[in-house]
């Protein structure tokens, strides 16, 4: 939940259906940012 709030302190939508849509948009964005920040490790030997 902390990561979800890092994109904004609160959910902007008031309608429950729109809140769900907003969260469904934020989660792929968080996953993409996490993938970009993860180091790639290659085995050498």
Image (tube, grey):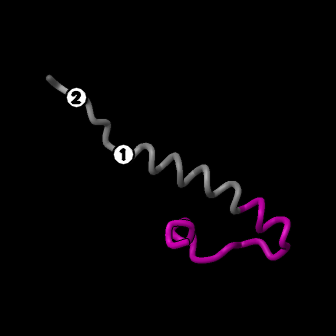
First-in-chain label (1 vs 2): 1
Q: Is residue 20 above or below residue 42?
A: below
Which residues, given as a range, are shown in magenta? 1-22
Q: Which mark is residue 6?
A: none
Question: Would residue 13 appear left or right of 31 to someone viewing this image?
Answer: right
Does residue 24 appear left or right of residue 39 in this picture? right
Q: Residue at x 77, y 59 (%)?
A: 21
**Callout 2: helix, strand or loop?**
loop
> x%, y% of residue 9?
57, 76
How far apart are labels 1 and 2 at the CA level? Answer: 16 Å
19 in magenta: yes
Viewport quadrant of the C terminus: top left
Work out whether 25 lies above or below 42.
below
Badge 1 marks a residue whose secondary structure is: loop
Q: Position of residue 24 (x, y in %)?
A: 70, 56
The disc label shown at residue 38, or none: 1
In the rendered image, residue 15, in percent from the top left (x then y), is placed at: 85, 73
Quarter occupied by residue 42: top left
Q: Observer-nearest residue: 12 or 33? A: 33
Q: Quadrant of the N terminus?
A: bottom right
Give the left or right position of residue 6, taking residue 26 as reference.
Answer: left
Q: Residue furthest top?
A: 45
Q: Which mark is residue 43?
A: 2
């Amino acid at each position: 939940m902390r990561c979800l709030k890092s994109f904004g302190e609160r959910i902007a939508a008031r309608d429950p259906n729109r809140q769900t849509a907003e969260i469904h948009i934020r989660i792929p964005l968080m996953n993409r940012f996490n993938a970009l920040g993860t180091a790639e490790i290659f085995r050498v030997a």
